[in-house]
Image (cartoon, rainbow, N blue to C red):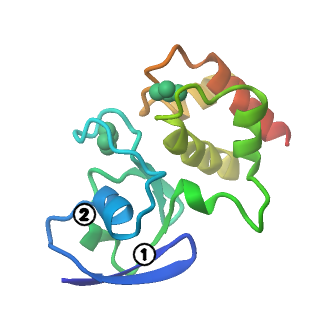
Amino acid sequence: MQVTITVNGLPYTREVEPRLLLVHFLRDELNLTGTHWGCDTSNCGVCTVQLDGVPVKSCTVLAVMADGHEVTTVEGLERDGELDAVQKGFMECHGLQCGFCTPGMLLTARWLLDREPHPDEGTIREAISGQLCRCTGYENIVKSIQRAAEL
Ligand code: FES
Ligand code: FES
């Protein structure tokens, strides 16, 4: 099937198998490897991207379901050489540990701050509750999102 998906503002048209997952479309067809692939069972959240501005687990979305829609990946957060506030927050507060969960955390954080610019700690923790960080904990991730809200 032919699909046209706008990714980070640019349209991409490709022939894909109907079973192709969005995560593999992004990584293998477009070489956007910032979107990670972990459990493949909709549990870990490392594959999170925004689909029409809403965080989704791209391992549970078929590429054909994104046909005609807009996807934002971690590569699309930086604008004109300027890091997004969530990227700056993670950098300043050491929210990035091994980095495997980070792209998905950043996209969920961006979505949260777009809806709620000054969320409290509980709201932040709930927003990222669909994403697992295997490294140590969520303390610095929460601090990073709070810092991004200040920025
Ligand atoms: S790879 Fe998608 S939720 Fe784990
Ligand atoms: S930073 Fe390592 S999994 Fe979250």
Residue under label 1? 69
Q: In 3D space, how far apart are the residues under numbered discs 2 and 1 (Cα atoms)?
A: 12 Å
Looking at the picture, how far across and down is residue 48, in whole percent?
43, 47
Residue 87 appears left or right of 60 = right
Quadrant in the picture for residue 140: top right
Lateral position of residue 120 relative to residue 37, left or right = right
* Residue 40 rendering spot, x and y as whole percentages: 24, 42
**Residue type, label 1:** His
- The answer to whether residue 7 shows anywhere in this view is yes
Residue type at numbered disc 2: Leu
Q: Which residue is mark 2?
A: 62
In the rendered image, which quarter contains the C terminus? top right
Q: Is residue 110 left or right of residue 103?
A: right
Q: Is residue 11 above or below residue 143?
A: below
Residue drawn at x 63%, y 26% is 141
Q: Indicate the quadrant containing the N terminus: top left, top right, bottom left or bottom right.
A: bottom left
**Earlier along the polypeptide chain: callout 2 or callout 1?**
2
| Residue 32 percent location from the top left of the image | 45, 61
Is residue 119 visible to the viewer in this orientation of the structure?
A: no
Q: Quadrant of ligand 1?
A: top left
Quick check: 18 left or right of 80? Answer: left
Residue at 42%, 81% in the rendered image: 12
